[in-house]
Image (cartoon, rainbow, N blue to C red):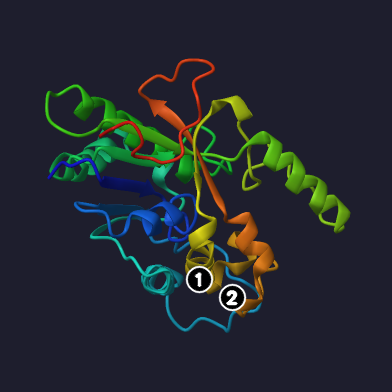
Amino acid sequence: MGGSHVLALVVAHPDDDAYGLAGTVALHERDPGFRFVLIHATDGGAGGVDPAYPPLNEPLGQVRRREMEAAWTAHGRPPDRHEWLDYDDGTLSDVPRTELVERIGGILAQERPDVVATFGPDGITGHPDHIAVGAATDAAFELLRTDGGPGLRRLLHGAMRRSTWERWNRGRIRHGLEPWNEARVYDLRPVPDELIGIEVDVRSVAGRVVAGLMEHRTQRYAVSPGVPSDAQEDAGWSRTSGAEPLVIAWPPRPPGAPVLGDVFEGLD
């Protein structure tokens, strides 16, 4: 089911997919042949819950599954295919690598997407689940890329520019918040600016990215601290959601190559 506008995103938890590529999906939603495939390894059932959220009367994982669906409905362009791998939250580093590669690779083999996106080696936050699912996706991509079939033309890693990270950290300090420590698990981790190979300008659809983010209500403390309950009040958060920087993990990017403006640029 290959094509130049098929995008697959492989993540660990609900809300991992709410930023990083949501703007790109919105920009391409009407493209002929555009198809969006989303894979979640876990339902995030072992995560924390925002203190402002009402007491739960059901497993957190069930709530987070509904939040994921509500988020993409609010965004306006749900995935064409969505798969839960149903691993327990927090256990992905214990899953045999070959099993995780086979599970992810099986879906990618059916879809043959031209662009696959996942976490890089830093997991963006150092979360072991992020790192495990990213490494398995990389391995599955490499196996399929070399099998002679269509698709699998570009592998992307979600990332944050160091310059952005430093600017945001200065803002945290000004507001009396503890600065991020890139060596601490769950804190954001940057990559050098020169490693960013794609940066998509999604300012025109940032409101849709924010609308999706805000549906992850149990995770508000983690994914969007300080975001108001009314998206219309949220000009500040929309500004921070206006760009999607990505590292091109495959094909190799020559040093000094220009930064592309779209995940599909140069593939047609």
Residue nearest the viewer, comparing 247 with 267: 267
| Image position, residue 73 (x, y; %) | 37, 73
Asked whether, in this view, residue 117 is left or right of residue 149, the answer is right
Q: Is residue 228 above or below residue 136?
A: below
| Residue at (64% x, 58% y) in the render | 239
Q: Would residue 95 be seen by someone viewing this image from the given angle?
A: no
Image quarter of the N terminus: top left
Answer whether labels 2 and 1 touch (C-beta < 8 Å). Answer: yes
In terms of image quadrants, where is residue 225?
A: bottom right
Mark 1 highlights which residue?
211
Asked whether, in this view, residue 174 is left or right of residue 127, the answer is right
How many numbered dots are placed on residues in this image?
2
| Residue at (43% x, 60% y) in the render | 14
Q: Secondary structure at mark 1?
A: helix
Residue nearest the viewer, comparing 110 with 92: 110
Residue type at the position of mark 1? Ala
Of the two numbered discs 2 and 1 on the same chain, state the one appearing first in sequence: 1
| Image position, residue 154 (x, y; %) | 32, 32
Mark 2 highlights which residue?
231
Q: Would residue 196 be seen by someone viewing this image from the given angle?
A: yes
Badge 2: few (under 14), some or many (20 or more) residues near its Cα, within 10 Å? Answer: some
Q: Is residue 135 above or below residue 82?
A: above
Image quarter of the C terminus: top left
Residue type at the position of mark 2? Ala
| Image position, residue 170 (x, y; %) | 82, 46
Q: Is residue 76 above or below residue 181?
A: below
| Residue at (21% x, 41% y) in the render | 108
| Image position, residue 23 (x, y; %) | 45, 56
Residue nearest the viewer, comparing 70 with 151: 151
